[in-house]
Image (cartoon, rainbow, N blue to C red):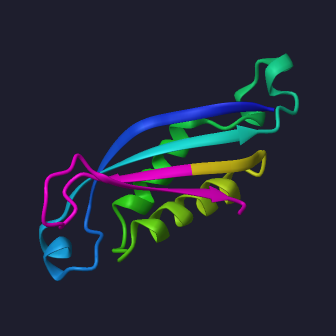
C-alpha cells in the first residue's frame, strides 16, 4: 500500500445550514488522504493503474462547487465515496473539510470535519 495526499485544496462553495451561507458562499479547504493498493503502478511506472491526482482534484472540485450540503460532514463523506468509486484501487479515503468562515459567535481559524471511508 502507499498513500497519496492532496493538501489544502481550495474551492468556493455554498454549504451550510443558514440561508445566508447559500446566498453568500465561501471558501472551503479539502485534504484527501488516499491509501492505495499498488497493483503494477509502482513497478511499471504507469499512471493508468494508480490514482491520477489531477483527476482526483477534479472529482473533489465538482462536489464542493456543486449542490449545497447543509453539513460539511456530508460533503466530506460524498467526496470520499466519489473518489473510492472513481478509483477502485483506493482502499481507504480520509477526507478533511475546513470551513474558515463558520457562523459562530467567537473567533476561530476554522471548523473542520474528518471522515474515513469505508467506515
Query: Which quarter of the rendered picture does the C terminus lie within?
Result: bottom right
Residue 21 location, quadrant:
bottom left
Where does the magenta region start and end?
Answer: 95-119
In the rendered structure, does residue 28 fall within the stretch colored magenta?
A: no
Identify the residue at horizontal 87%, vertical 28% (top origin): 40
Check the image and name the residue furthest to the front.
106
Query: Which quarter of the rendered picture does the N terminus lie within?
Result: top right
Residue 117 location, quadrant:
bottom right
Identify the residue at horizontal 47%, vertical 67% (top origin): 73
Q: Is residue 86 left or right of residue 1?
A: left
Q: Is residue 41 left or right of residue 22?
A: right
In the rendered structure, does residue 106 fall within the stretch colored magenta?
A: yes
Q: Position of residue 3 (x, y in %)?
A: 68, 32
Up/down of 32 relative to 107, above or below: above
Q: Is residue 2 left or right of residue 17?
A: right
Q: Position of residue 69 (x, y in %)?
A: 38, 74
Q: Position of residue 56 (x, y in %)?
A: 55, 44
Up/down of 17 relative to 50, above or below: below
In front of the other: 85 or 91: 91
Amino acid at each position: 500500500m502507499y498513500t497519496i495526499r492532496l493538501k489544502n485544496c481550495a474551492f468556493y462553495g455554498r454549504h451550510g445550514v443558514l440561508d445566508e451561507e447559500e446566498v453568500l458562499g465561501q471558501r472551503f479547504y479539502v485534504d484527501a488522504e488516499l491509501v492505495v493498493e499498488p497493483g503494477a503502478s509502482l513497478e511499471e511506472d504507469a499512471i493508468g493503474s494508480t490514482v491520477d491526482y489531477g483527476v482526483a482534484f477534479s472529482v473533489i472540485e465538482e462536489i464542493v462547487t456543486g449542490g449545497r450540503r447543509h453539513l460539511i460532514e456530508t460533503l466530506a463523506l460524498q467526496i470520499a465515496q466519489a473518489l473510492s468509486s472513481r478509483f477502485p484501487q483506493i482502499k481507504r479515503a480520509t477526507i478533511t473539510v475546513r470551513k474558515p468562515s463558520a457562523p459562530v459567535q467567537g473567533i476561530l481559524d476554522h471548523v473542520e470535519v474528518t471522515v474515513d471511508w469505508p467506515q
